[in-house]
Image (spheres, helix red, strand yellow):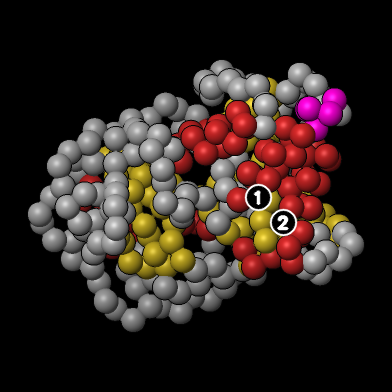
Amino acid sequence: MNQMASLTCSSSSSFSTKLPLHSSTPLTRRRRRSTHEFLRMVTRSCLDDSSALLRAAQYTVDTYVKSGMVVGLGSGHASGMAIQHLGHQLRIGNLKDIVGIPMSVASASEAAKSGIPLDTYQDSTQIDFAFDDADAIEEGTLVAIIGRRKLQSEESIVQEKSILYAANKLVFIIEENQYKGGLEGSIPVLIHSPTWLATAEEIDDIFLGDAEVWRRPAIGQAGPLGGDFPLVTKEGCNVLDLIFTSPIASLAEVAKRLDTVDGVVDHGVVSKIPCTVVIASPNGMKILDKLTADIVG
């Protein structure tokens, strides 16, 4: 899958055919042992609960953003605080000539209020640095999941991932409980709308016993089919939530299998190297660097 391509999906009315979800007992996965020799960890001084994420956001801007940079502006609570701090640094003159590339409507709005000059993302855009929130990050590999949150109008996982991959340097800002091995929960999968049912059934078969597949509704709560008003993204895609009920042995392997499914446009797994993760914790801030790919024996 070309992460940088401009992708579209044709939208269509919802199907009435029922998606047969499997109810088998989830299989227990044996965790793979691997070596991660390329991580650097630095622990900062102890912080209190209320200031930990704010300090992590401020640290990210103060450490990695330099005058003259084009900066990808992420989505989420931590990214919002980082955008506000970046705007403050511009106003007091500590930074100059910054151009922000927002990943969502929310980040564009926050940046505009903070006085950050903005530009829109194009495939040829050169991005020096980007920061973003992540829903979860896999311990050791620093592979991230994004897109679990409810998408607002004009928001795009495709655009968010394109900006992340285009950046020369990437930092995720997360809280301590979002960094762990054996992740569970959902991974969003963008699919072509007209053939959504066949694609959903294929994904359901691939992950039988380990995950369930639900089509995301545009409003309210709905069953596996997404109700009468399934979510349609700005590209015209439906979104499937691939909900894991047993620990994920490898996010990279999940992404690899999803990429082989006809009808899948993109998904919420981000594997970017090099990558840095700034982890906010009441016990101190941790900085993890992934400098190169794993060597799997």
Q: Residues within 10 Å of mark 1 (few under 14, many from 20)?
A: many
Residue projecting furthest to the left: 16
Q: CA distance from mark 2 to mark 1?
A: 6 Å
Residue stretch in magenta:
89-93
User: Which residue carries the number 1 mark?
Assistant: 78
Q: Which residue is mark 2?
A: 53
Main SS of the magenta segment? helix
Residue 108 x %, y %:
55, 32
Badges 2 and 1: C-beta atoms under 8 Å apart? yes
Q: Residue at x 42, y 26 (%)?
A: 6
Q: In which image quadrant can residue 284 be found?
A: bottom right
Q: Is residue 130 above or below residue 254?
A: above
Specify whether residue 91 is painted magenta: yes
| Residue placed most toward the observer, 12 or 82 | 82
The reply, left or right, for residue 19 in relation to residue 139 is left
With respect to residue 261, does 8 lie above or below?
above
